Image (spheres, helix red, strand yellow):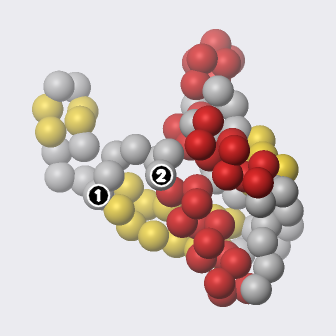
């Protein structure tokens, strides 16, 4: 992962948490610093584990992409993911993924 122009060996932890019960529904540790590719994997894990898809998904702006928004719309999952530009303006880039 890149930090102040240096490369460090770090891990990126991904969690999907139920907003109502606060239980962890899915978790994964990756070496990729980007979060964008992880929404589909988390949704699929939840579907396989619980035989049910999430109704809503809240994620920080690191998960925003047109592909993710389209994927969630196709799955009929209501999403709350701010565009990176909007998040920077409001300084809300570190909201938890639920």
Residue 64 drawn above or below residue 91? below
Decide if residue 30 is in sight here: yes
Q: Which residue is mark 2?
A: 37
Q: Are marks 2 and 1 in contact (CB under 8 Å)?
A: no
Pointer 2 or 1: first along the chain: 1
Question: For residue 42, which quarter of the picture?
Answer: bottom right
Question: For residue 81, which quarter of the picture?
Answer: top right
Q: Which residue is mark 1?
A: 31
Which quadrant: the C terminus?
A: bottom right
Residue at the location (64% across, 13% down)? 89
Residue at the location (43% across, 60% down)? 13
Q: Secondary structure at mark 1?
A: loop
Q: Residue furthest top?
A: 89
Q: Nearer the viewer, mark 2 or mark 1?
A: 2
Residue 59 drawn above or below residue 47? above
Residue 63, disc: none
Which quadrant: the N terminus?
A: top left
Closer to the camera in the image, 50 or 4: 50
Residue 88 drawn above or below residue 69? above
Q: CA distance from mark 2 to mark 1?
A: 12 Å
Q: Secondary structure at mark 2?
A: loop
Closer to the camera in the image, 77 or 10: 77
């Amino acid at each position: 992962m890149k930090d102040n122009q240096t490369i460090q060996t770090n891990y990126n932890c991904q969690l999907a948490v139920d907003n109502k019960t606060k239980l962890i529904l899915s978790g994964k540790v990756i070496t990729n610093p980007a979060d964008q590719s992880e929404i589909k994997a988390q949704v699929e894990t939840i579907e396989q584990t619980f035989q049910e898809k999430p109704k809503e998904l809240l994620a920080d702006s690191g998960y925003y992409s047109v592909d993710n928004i389209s994927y969630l719309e196709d799955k009929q999952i209501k999403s709350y993911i701010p565009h990176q530009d909007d998040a920077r303006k409001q300084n809300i880039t570190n909201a938890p993924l639920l």
